Image (spheres, helix red, strand yellow):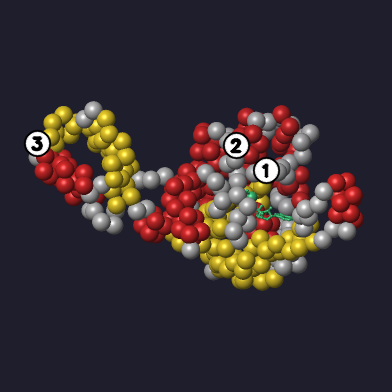
Amino acid sequence: MTAISVKNLVKEFRVPVREKGEGRWSAVMSTFFRKWESVQVLKSISFDVEEGEFVGYVGPNGAGKSTTIKILTGILSPSSGEVRVLGFNPQRDRYKYSYNIGVVFGQRTLLDFDIPVINSFKLYRDIYELSSREFEERLDYFSKILKIDEFMHIPVRKLSLGQRMRAEIVTSFLHRPKVVFLDEPTIGLDAVAKEEVRGFLRRINRDEKVTIILTTHDMDDIEQTCERILMIDAGKIIFDGPLSRMKKEFMLHKRIEFAYDRIVNQRLFDSLLGKAKVETSGQNRLAFMVDTRQQDIPRFVDELLSSAEITDLSVHEPRLESIIREIYLKQHAK
Ligand SMILES: Nc1ncnc2c1ncn2[C@@H]1O[C@H](COP(=O)(O)OP(=O)(O)OP(=O)(O)O)[C@@H](O)[C@H]1O
Ligand SMILES: [Mg+2]
C-alpha cells in the first residue's frame, strides 16, 4: 500500500525584490513600495512511499527538505501539485490527519517548557484519547529503548538536548501513528545520543511498520537506518533509490592503504601503482585511490600482496558525504 504520494509538487514563496539604491530615501521608498517576486523552492517533485518504508531525505542547505516536510504535514499549502498521505489531503483534512501522523522538528519543540516531561506526555495522551492502560504500555516500551525514566519528572527547559530530543520522539510516536516525519532529529546530539535515536527508529520501524521520512545531514544516520534515499537539490529530486544502488552507481573509488617491508616483485608493484592514483606516500607506506570500474578490488589486493611483503593493509569506502557531494557536482556541471 502506498502511504505517501506526491505528484508534481510545486512550492513558491513570495519574497521582496532586493533593490539596489542609495541613501535613506530609497530605503524608505522600498519599504512602502516594495516589489515582490516569486521564487520556486520546490520545482515539481514527485515520489511515492510505500507503507513501512524508511526513507532518508537528504540534500544541501536550502534544497527544500523542510519545505517538503511542512507541506506533507499540512503546515504549508502547495502552490500546485498533489499530496496524499494515508489518503488524506494534509492541509484540508488537517485535524483528522494529525491523529495519524507524528512529527519532530529537531530545531523546534512541541513540548511545554515549564512542566515536567511526564505532564507533557499526559497532555498528548488526552489529545490522542489514549486509555490509561495503552498509555502505560506505551511509556513502558519507550523507557526500555530510550531510557526516558531518568528525566520524566524534570521540566523540559532543564533537560539536556539529548534528553529533550528523546522526549520529543516519544511524543511523536505516542499514539502509534502510521507515518512519522522527522526533520533533523539528531541535530546537535552527541555520538551516544545519536546511536540511541537511530536504534529506536530502526526498532519502531520494524516493530510497528511505521513509515518514516527522515531528513538529516548526518550520513551515519542514513547509513544505519534507511533503505531508500531521496536526494533533493535546488528543489528537484536528483536521486531516488536504495542506498545500495547509490553506492554502486556513485562509489567510483576505494582507498587502499598499506605498509610494506620489502618489494619482492618490482615490476608487478610498479604496474599496480600505475593503475592507481597515489594520495600519500611515506617511508614504506602508501595510500592510493583505485577506480572500482576499472579494477577488480579483491584481485588488485591479491596482486599487491604478492608483489611486496605487506605488513599492514586496509581498504576504505569513501564516506557517504563525499559520494553525495560528487553527485551534486555532476548535477551542477550539466
Ligand atoms: N517562508 C518562506 N519564505 C520565503 N522563502 C522561504 C520560506 N521558507 C523557506 N524558504 C526558502 O526556501 C528554500 C528551501 O528551504 P528549506 O528550509 O526547505 O531548506 P532545507 O532543505 O530544509 O535546508 P536545511 O538543510 O538548511 O534545513 C530556502 O532557500 C529558503 O530560504
Ligand atoms: Mg531544513
- Which is nearer the eye, 155 or 125? 155
Against 283, residue 178 (above or below) is below
Kindly indicate whether the residue at mark 1 contacts the one at mark 2 (C-beta within 8 angstroms).
no
Q: Mark 3 highlights which residue?
A: 264
Query: Is residue 161 something one can see in this rendering?
Result: yes
Q: Mark 1 highlights which residue?
A: 107
Any mark on residue 74, and which? none
Crowding near pointer 3: few (<14 within 10 Å), some, many (20+)? few
| First in residue order: circle 2 vs circle 1 | 1
Q: Residue furthest front?
A: 22
| Residue 250 in the image, given as x and y percentages of width and height | 39, 56
- Residue type, label 2: Gly
Query: Is residue 51 something one can see in this rendering?
Result: no
Quick one: SS at disc 1?
Answer: loop
Ligand 2 near label 1 (Cβ, under 8 Å)?
A: yes
Q: Residue furthest left?
A: 264
- Residue type, label 3: Val
